[in-house]
Amino acid sequence: MSKQAKGVISNQLRKKRFEKDEMTQQELAKALGVTRQTIAAIEAGKYSPSLEVAFCLSDIFETALDELFQWQANNSKISKE
């Protein structure tokens, strides 16, 4: 079986940080137990967080996961071999 379904995860993390008293990347990183660079990479779409980190972000910002992260699938078909 060959899978070609991939997509892009976008996020509203930067927006949510600023809505929460202009929280810095460093403050958020400290609350999560990760580095500031990890937060920057997630915001830039260069890194997808683990489920644990994603749920923690949801708790911190008191918002649903699908409000923080959005999945945009490409239009490639999944082929079975």
Image (cartoon, rainbow, N blue to C red):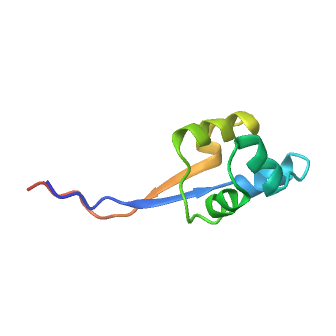
At 75% from the left and 37% from the top, the residue drawn is: 60
At 86% from the left and 51% from the top, the residue drawn is: 23
Left or right for 31, reference 39: right
- In the rendered image, residue 40, in percent from the top left (x then y), is placed at 69, 62
Picture quarter with the C terminus: bottom left
Q: Nearer the viewer, residue 20 or 47?
A: 47
Q: Nearer the viewer, residue 72 or 11?
A: 11
Q: Quadrant of residue 56?
A: top right
At 61% from the left and 36% from the top, the residue drawn is: 55
Q: Quadrant of residue 39?
A: bottom right
Of all residues, the one furthest to the right in this rendering is 21
Image: 16 above or below 73: above
- In the rendered image, residue 6, in percent from the top left (x then y), is placed at 36, 60
Of all residues, the one furthest to the left in this rendering is 81
- In the rendered image, residue 46, in percent from the top left (x then y), is placed at 56, 66
Q: Nearer the viewer, residue 33 or 64?
A: 33
Q: How many marks?
A: 0
Left or right for 34, reference 28: left
